[in-house]
Amino acid sequence: MLRALALCLFVSTAAAADPGFWRSEWPETDFSRASVGSWSEIISGGPGKDGIPALSDPGFVAVGGARLEPREPVITVALEGATPRAYPLRYLTWHEIVNDRIGGLPVAVTYCPLCNSAMVFDRRLGGRVLSFGVTGKLRNSDMVMYDRETQSWWQQALGEGIVGEMTGRELRQLPSWMESFAAFRAAHPEGLVMAQPAYPRDYGRNPYQRYDSSKRPFLYSGDPPPHGIPALERVVRVGDRAWPMTRLAREGRIEEAGVTLLWADTQASALDTARIAQGRDVGAIRVRDGRGRDVAHDVLFAFAFHAFWPEGRWMLGR
């Protein structure tokens, strides 16, 4: 497999398909409640609980003071009434979750490199504010998060509780998108950029070198996507529909199913070359509704869409 994966995931082995194996590490998790079909669906990604350290209340710098390369990818969150913020993947690659507040709204900015899934959630649920960490577990190669308040486990790609007290509960996804730092800077000259965390990491380096040009996903044993779509092709997911990025690159603009998808920018892949800023161009997109408002969506790999939405609709065009 990819040599660099070992730096972040160590030696990955499947955990025993029995929650009893995990109880010593997770004594406060209610394993009697779960929505997974089989415990064997959840495996170890290598690091243990908090082995990938989530961040909370990060610092920010003005966009003019951010030391990022123009094509570096960022997750942009531009909520009404709040200063737009950019969360660089050079940091999210190593931390995967950022617990933050934007204009008083508690949010979780999440990124799973193995699925390329970047999603932002409202952390409020059931009258309380949750804070999230990384379990070190994977399901269909996607990060399993946990909340520190109930120790429940959450599927990042779904924003849904899958083990514990919060099983079946869903987080509200907020509109966000991935774009280049140059695009963020041009659109938001007064914006804020997440500052470099105080951790000993080689930020800017890609520990998943050449991953998105691999033939097969890491730690995934499910079926490949249908229609001959490569497992690691990026697709734009809105609800239970997926548009291949190759189609959007070809057409430039697609209006279907009540949304408009636009090929909006150039952007370096965070999962290609050794340095993120030098990754090949994978493009960037925006998704808006009929009134021009940004729509919550995800740009993930095709295998992950097929795994979590097996009955989902593939928007292949003609």
Image (cartoon, rainbow, N blue to C red):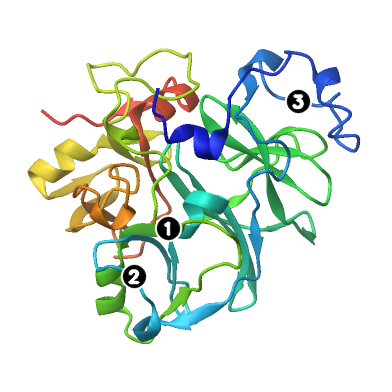
Mark 1 crowd level (few <14, some 14–19, many ≥20, 10 Å Cα): many
Q: Are marks 2 and 3 in contact (CB under 8 Å)?
A: no
Q: Which residue is mark 3?
A: 34
Tell me what residue is drawn at x 71 percent, y 16 percent.
39
Where is residue 282? Give x, y as percent: 22, 47
Q: Give whichever of discs 2 and 1 has the lower sequence position.
A: 2
Q: Which residue is mark 2?
A: 68
Query: Which amino acid does the dot numbered 2 rest on?
Result: Leu
> Label 2, label 1: how many angstroms apart (C-alpha)?
9 Å
Q: Which residue is mark 1?
A: 90
Where is residue 45? Give x, y as percent: 60, 29
Query: Which amino acid does the dot numbered 3 rest on?
Result: Ala
Q: Residue 286 is drawn in which quadrant?
A: bottom left
Observer-side mark, 2 or 3, equals: 2
Front residue of this view, candidates 24 and 173: 24
On screen, residue 144 versus residue 210, left or right, reads right
Query: Which amino acid does the dot numbered 1 rest on?
Result: Arg
Q: Classify mark 1: helix, strand or loop.
A: helix
Front residue of this view, candidates 116 and 314: 116
Mark 2 crowd level (few <14, some 14–19, many ≥20, 10 Å Cα): some
> Label 2, label 3: how many angstroms apart (C-alpha)?
42 Å
> Label 3, label 1: how many angstroms apart (C-alpha)?
33 Å
Q: Give whichever of discs 3 and 1 has the lower sequence position.
A: 3
> Where 317 sits versus 110, above or below?
above
Res. 38 in view: no
Q: Give whichever of discs 2 and 3 has the lower sequence position.
A: 3
Where is residue 295? Give x, y as percent: 39, 56
Front residue of this view, candidates 302 and 65: 65
> Where 240 sits versus 223, above or below?
below
Quadrant showing the N terminus: top left
